[in-house]
Image (cartoon, rainbow, N blue to C red):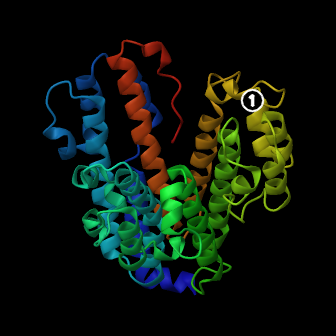
Amino acid sequence: MEGLFFNVNGGYVEGIVRGYRNSLLSGQNYSNLTQCETIDDVKLQLAPSYGDFLASLPPNPSTSDLAGRMMDKLVSEFKYLTAQATGSSAEFLEYMKYGYMIDNVALLITGTLHGRELKPLLERCHPLGWFETLPALISATNIEELYNIVLIETPLAAYFKDSLSHQDLDELNIEIVRNTLYKNYLEDFHHFITTHPDFRGSPTQDVMAEILQFEADRRSINITLNSFGTDLSKSERANLYPQIGKLYPEGNYMLGKADDVEGVALAVSAVADYKAFFDAVGLSQGGGLGGMGGGPADGKSLEDLFYQKEMELSKLIFTRQFTPAVVYGWMKLKEQEIRNVTWISECIAQNQKERIGNFISVF
């Protein structure tokens, strides 16, 4: 069972991650960052947590370079964890990478459709979504070749099979392709953590099922809101909803029938958290999609509130023991930390420090 498994194998990985969590920026760190006047000041404040990864940056680096070095450290630490993991723990970490792989493949599909040089796009791929045969994709000369290589050479083959054809890649909007792949991925990841003998009935299933269901609901809501005013039909939209989550099946059915924001608010109203989010940004009263960009909720948008909930779920993982889910929680917290520092840095660089307070807490 999982407890014994982690005492033998995964406990070491879990211990490393709990040590990593101590390197997360604290409330005092963020307070110090908000007082910075230059990007060099930000860099100095980050030195205890990011050390050598920032050392080679030039004076007053760009915010993108700063974020890039922070991501380099995260990638390095994640790779170290994957090198230590075996068995079902290693499988779990591999599942964590699939979302990044989907983004990378979607980027290369877009490049192929538009006749772009793929080698520069390969350099833009997310390092956590890198897999051994990814470079083989740039050898494709057309979308059919690319599709065939994906089905043979990549870990995402199962997410394409029976869902997308090479004609779909030619004809469908790339976001429909991406959302189809994510739908299949989330359903597969959920099936893995609820059926694998090491995880079934364990803390891993408890925490990860809730997180994956939340992510599925978030995607279904965003797909619906973003579909208004587009050529996407209701039936096509409904096909993109993952068949897991608190909204599934009744809420998803109502989302599929929604004609406007009020219809979406009604569809999600049975789930207290989602109803509260829509109320907070003024979308429940027919406020229009403008509320997605920031309403009465202390200037936060609907997307911000979803990120905030994701951070709460990620922090809760650390209250459980003997589970590789702590890696997932740590990764999400670190990614939000990078977004926070990037936001603060951009406000400083643009002399708009009054906007700094709008970051999402991770501590």
Task: Judge whether 61 appears above or below 227 on screen.
Answer: above
Residue 95 versus residue 39: which sits nearer the camera? Answer: 95
In x, y percent, where is residue 263? 84, 39
What residue sits 39% from the left and 53% below the top? 113
Residue 4 versus residue 259: which sits nearer the camera? Answer: 259
Q: Which residue is mark 1?
A: 280
Counting every numbered tag in the picture gives 1
Task: Judge whether 13 appears above or below 108 on screen.
Answer: below
What residue sits 42% from the left and 13% below the top? 352
In x, y percent, where is residue 72? 27, 50
Q: Name the element at disc 1.
A: helix
In x, y percent, where is residue 230? 66, 39
Position of 286 with respect to 117 (left or right) is right
Position of 45 with respect to 186 (left or right) is left
Query: Can residue 299 be spotted in the picture?
Result: yes
| Residue type marked 1 | Ala
Residue 146 versus residue 102: which sits nearer the camera? Answer: 146
Splitting the image into 4 quarters, where does residue 269 fall?
top right
